[in-house]
Image (cartoon, helix red, strand yellow):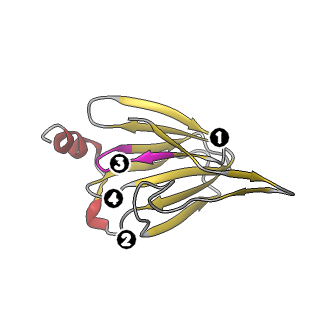
Amino acid sequence: MIKLIKIPKINDDCFLHFVENNKHIPFATKRVYYITQPNADLYRGKHAHYQNKQVIFCIQGKVKMVIDDGNKKEVVVLDKSEVGLFLDKMIWHEMHDMNKNTILLVFASKFYDENDYIRDYNDFLKIANTK
């Protein structure tokens, strides 16, 4: 389930990272968003998508990603800005152990559509185990 994507990191007078559609990101990007200043007492995510695919980069700080396909759970820590996690459709994901300085950058294959979200874990398990 864990598929890490490494992007170029150019070291000049700073670090410059870049991503290219269908090269580093395995889909055409329709939406880009970022998460800043998370509440350290809470965890984020807690959902899956019917169709949307994503690549998540932790560009500052760290995040523990818990991913679940309905049969198996895996955990990966993202703490290098040049390494992203590919989340295919129908993968439950949660983001844990972030601090106030953590910044997540997300590339998504679909425009925002609330109907694409599965927000109840038990519903996700039923759907995932019938496919």
Give amino acid for label 1.
Answer: Asp
Mark 2 or 1, nearer chain start: 1
Give amino acid for label 3.
Answer: Asp
> Is residue 13 or residue 114 the one in the foreground?
13
Would you say 67 lies left or right of 8 here? left
Mark 2 or 3, nearer chain start: 3
Mark 4 or 3, nearer chain start: 4
Q: Tell me how far mark 4 sits from mark 1, CA to CA.
A: 24 Å
Mark 1 or 3, nearer chain start: 1
Q: Tell me how far mark 1 sits from mark 3, CA to CA.
A: 20 Å
Kind of element beneath mark 4: loop
Bounds of the magenta segment? 85-92
Report the number of discs: 4
Residue sitting at x 44%, y 66% = 29
Mark 3 lies on residue? 88
Mark 2 or 4, nearer chain start: 4
Q: Are marks 2 and 3 in contact (CB under 8 Å)?
A: no
Mark 4 lies on residue? 52
Q: Which mark is residue 111?
A: 2
Where is residue 101 drawn, in percent x and y?
71, 52
Vertical side of 35 occupied by 48: above or below: above
Q: Tell me how far mark 2 sits from mark 1, CA to CA.
A: 27 Å
Query: Residue 86 colored magenta?
Result: yes
Q: Tell me how far mark 2 sits from mark 4, CA to CA.
A: 8 Å
Kind of element beneath mark 3: loop
Crowding at dot 4, Cα within 10 Å, few <14 / some 14-19 / many 20+, comes out as many
Residue sitting at x 57%, y 62% = 34
